[in-house]
Image (cartoon, rainbow, N blue to C red):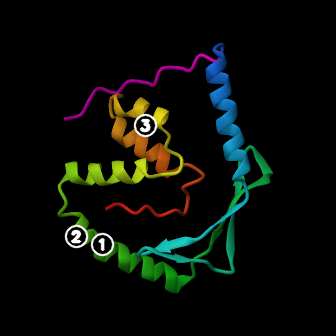
Amino acid sequence: MQTEFRNEPTVDFARDENVSAMKEALAKVSSELGREVDLVIGGERVRTTEKIKSLNPSNPNEVVGLVSKANQELAQRAMDVASSTFESWRRVAPHARARILWRAASNSPACDGKTKQKYRNAPNANWRFMILLLSAPSNRGSSFVVD
């Protein structure tokens, strides 16, 4: 059952706690700029000598991160793993998939109790929460172990 789309409430930056939280978040992200990220293929970390530079579009002199660049062989291996994994994943019930992804996002280093609580009770929360955490700079290139 889908819930009705609603925009997130705006943040009131006149409140000191919101300003502090934003400054902390920006400092955390800034401290991670320029980080090198491995490829993850079938759970195996792969570091290559060739890198792709990810640049800040608003400041092209700022390197957001360096990502290992896959060659044709690595790309094919990733496609093979994705295809074979999809066969079992597609038989997993949607609610079970959501539970697995929620647990993976919850195990993320970017997840704190406040963030988790905010998204737990919001409409369409699971998907927004997972996208937020799995795309956080501290998680790019990370793999999550979900038991």
Q: Residue furthest top?
A: 14
Image quadrant where one finds the N terminus = top left
Q: In the rendered image of this protein, does residue 80 appear above or below residue 10?
A: below
The residue under label 2 is 88
Q: In the rendered image of this protein, does residue 74 appear above or below residue 55?
A: below
Query: What amino acid is labelled 3 in the image?
Result: Lys
Q: Residues in magenta? A: 1-13
- CB under 8 Å between callouts 1 and 2? yes
Q: In the picture provided, is 18 more to the left or to the right than 90? A: right
The residue under label 3 is 116
Q: What is the quadrant of residue 34 in the picture?
A: bottom right
Query: What amino acid is labelled 1 in the image?
Result: Thr
Label 1: state its secondary structure.
helix
Q: Is residue 12 magenta?
A: yes
Name the spot of residue 90 as percent of width and height, x first. Answer: 22, 63
Q: Disc 1 to disc 2, how far (Cα)?
A: 6 Å
